[in-house]
Image (cartoon, rainbow, N blue to C red):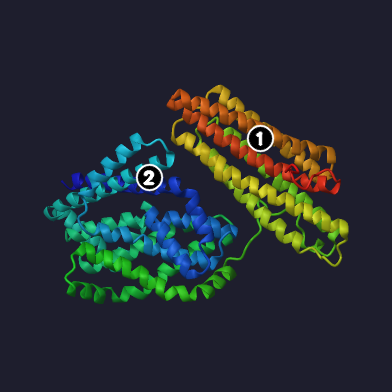
Amino acid sequence: MAASILLNLSGSIALLLWGIHMLSGSVQRALGSNLRYLLSVGTRNRFQAFFVGLGVTALLQSSTATAMMLTSFAGSGVVDLVPSLAIMLGANVGTTLIVQIAAFDISLFSPITLLVGLVLFRRARRSDIRDMAQALIGLGLMLLALKLLTETMQPVEASALLRQILPSLTQDHFAAIILTAIVAWAAHSSLASMLFIMSLANTGTVDPISTLAMVLGANLGSALNPLFASLGENPSHLRLPVGNLLNRVIGCLLIWPFVGSISGLLGEWHLAPAPAAALFHLIFNLTLAVLSIGLLGPIARGLMFILPERPSVDDPATPQFLAESALKTPSVAVSNATREVLRMAGFVEAMLKGSRDSFHKDDRNNIENVKKLDDVVDRLFEAIQRYVVAIDSDASNKDDAARISQILAFVINLEHIGDIIVGNLMNTSAKRINSKIKFPSDVLAETDAMHSRVIGNLQLAISVFMFGDPDAARSLVAAKEHFREIERDMTQRHFAIMRKGILEEAEASSLLLDITRDVKRIEAHVAASAQNILEASGQLRSSRLRAL
């Protein structure tokens, strides 16, 4: 009987973890770019950052997923450390919200969410709606797993062996904290471990004080995953996970001596074991947030002192030519910046090639690789901007100032191209994969031709940037007109396909039209890099409008 219970228990936990994975992954796919944007910009102050973290984690139902995204932002400097720590405080509170709901019997909602999710998934055509349908299915599986966990633990009272083993493992409160921390770390989820703890508490397998000690362990263990994921990287990437872990450790040390008193207080409120554990989980995280949010400045400074930035030659986003010593010699500094711009342009070209390949293969890794290249482009963009504005203006001549203006204009266009690739083309590629759309050979040939043309024009733009050839600049501007014609023809063809009423052809045509418009926008930024050359040579009109 004991073996059967343990087997069913393992299967229920596996189902719970899979449900959490489906829910978190589907929400990230449906809202991923918006979530990343919200995490990167919603940080005007630590209080706003706190609520951003709470809201995002309430959606994802995983503070670990929030921490993973945020660690990359904080490590790359996109988000400052203080608001990052505030977001994590909010994330730790956000992950408790579903626990409050799960403390009550909501198993009736499991078949409802599964049924609604399945119907919506089978009928929906838009990839974002299908992702949200999968999220509903994941939620239904979580609720089903919770019900199975409760039913599986009920026979424990009749199993003398299990009733001896489990209490003995948790009788030592320190051992209970360590044991549950390991479980939460292995499960990559404090939510899963909390639901397991509440199941044990409901059956009376563990006493109330041990239950609270296990709640502390679940909070401690969930902070280990982002830390282990960042090991081996630049020390600056460890600041956020180390800060979050230290916050949890200090909280556990402060609360541990009082778990007996807290357990007695909760007992006086006549709460059932599961709601009592859920309430303690919420109080613990809220208390840490209130105590810590005013101290985030000193904490951040301490983390930056302990874990200083270490330039890595293996990091492609580390500038290779921006020597600080050359800033007092503008001609040398401008030359250095130009060489770094060429590196940045090379990464943008690699992104375009990755975009072209993504429409041939159903490979999400390719999309992620392109997104990683965009992070490199963004960081180089920031580094080049900071470098050129720091060049000694008093020692600069007119030619140096003009070249700095060209550099800034070119890197701005390169950065915008990267944003279009990631924010639009990669989203279109992901939609194609999610919708199981296979482009026919003629459509693939058209996407390849557009990508190849814009890649060729980017290479020409680099030449214009380097040598200032007016004839090459005119060719770039003329190429933009060609893409306008392509978009016009593609739009007319799409309307013709829509009139035929064949759904599969219409979906593929709609995606191809989106690709065409995005590539045209990229081409506009490529051509914009030639405008200052044409303006300087007097070959550019002030307006395309015809005089009346």
Image height of 220 relative to 462, above or below: below
The number of callouts visible is: 2
Name the amino acid, label 1: Arg
Image height of 278 relative to 507, above or below: below
Q: Position of residue 463 (x, y in %)?
A: 80, 41
If you read the primary sequence from the N terminus, does the residue marked by circle 2 or circle 1 appear first?
2
Q: Where is residue 369 in the image (x, y as percent from the top left)?
A: 57, 42
Q: Which residue is drawn at 55% across and 38% down?
A: 366
Mark 2 or mark 1, whichever is nearer to me: 1
Residue under pointer 1? 484
Residue under pointer 2? 132
Q: Which residue is drawn at 11% across and 53% down?
A: 158
Is label 1 in a helix, a strand or a loop?
helix
Residue closer to the observer: 34 or 94: 34
Q: Residue at x 54, y 43 (%)?
A: 368
Q: Can residue 14 be seen in this view?
A: yes
Q: Is residue 178 visible?
A: no
Image height of 302 relative to 65, above or below: below
Q: Distance from label 2 to label 1 (Cα)? A: 35 Å
Q: Position of residue 122 (x, y in %)?
A: 34, 34
Quadrant for the C terminus, please: top right
Q: Left or right of 546: which side holds 266?
A: left
Q: Specify few, some or many for label 2: CA neighbours under 10 Å numbering under 14, 14-19, or 20 or more.
A: many
Quarter occupied by residue 52: bottom left
Name the amino acid, label 2: Met
Is label 2 in a helix, a strand or a loop?
helix
Q: Where is residue 76 in the image (x, y as percent from the top left)?
A: 59, 57
